[in-house]
Amino acid sequence: MWNKNSLLLGLGMGLLLPALGFLLIYFGYTQLEESGIVSQRGFSPYFRERTSAVIAICLNLIPLNAFLKRRATQSMRGIVLATILLVILWVIYFGQYIIS
């Protein structure tokens, strides 16, 4: 799978990895909250969701680096395109909570 150099592979991986990462991080926080390890109170509205989404988007650096080492430029373009799309969606959805 890593040897294929395709825009669609990069785009799919660039969308799927952050989605799975967000679910794992967010539900991990939920489990820690239920066990009493972390507080239910956040620093600001939607803090946990915003931070989980940013970390999940940053997970795209892992396959991006792997494709860079293999010089798979089309797959890299797909991951960069997916990352830009996710960042735009993040700003649209959470932008109002940043400037408060």
Image (tube, grey):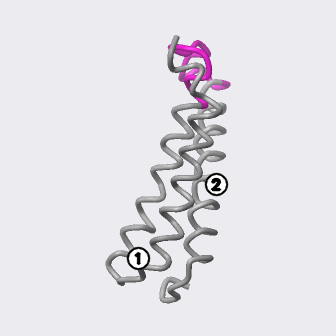
Instruction: Bin the neighbour count of mark 2 within 10 Å (Cα to Cα): few under 14, some 14-19, many 20 and up.
Output: few
Foreground pick, 76 / 45: 76
Magenta stretch: dominant SS? Answer: loop
Query: Is residue 39 or residue 65 the one in the foreground?
Result: 65
Q: Where in the figure is residue 84, as x and y percent of width and height?
A: 52, 53
Q: Is residue 55 above or below residue 80?
A: above
Residue 60, above or below 45: below
Residue 88: image tag: none
Q: Position of residue 81 (x, y in %)?
A: 53, 62
| Vertical placement of residue 53 versus 20, above or below | above
- Image coords of residue 40 (percent x, y): 61, 16
Between 38 and 35, the residue placed more toward the observer is 38
In the image, what residue occupies the spot 58% across and 49% down? 86
Corner quadrant of residue 46? top right
Q: Are marks 2 and 1 in contact (CB under 8 Å)?
A: no
Q: CA distance from mark 2 to mark 1?
A: 20 Å
Magenta run includes residue 36:
yes
25 falls in the magenta region: no
Q: Please tell me which residue is depicted at 45% across the width and 72% down the height of the picture.
A: 76
Seen from this angle, which residue lies furthest left? Answer: 69
Which badge, 2 or 1, is on the more N-terminal residue? Answer: 2
Give the labeled residue for mark 2. Answer: 20
Mark 2 or mark 1, whichever is nearer to me: 1
Extent of the magenta region? 34-49
Q: Which residue is mark 1?
A: 67
Task: Name the one closer to the observer, 9 or 22.
Answer: 9
Q: Hey, which residue is sitting farthest bottom in the picture?
A: 3
Secondary structure state at the residue bearing disc 1: helix
Query: Residue 6 location, x and y as percent?
Result: 55, 83
Disc 2 marks a residue whose amino acid type is Leu
Q: Quadrant of residue 36?
A: top right
Q: Residue at x 47, y 54 (%)?
A: 59
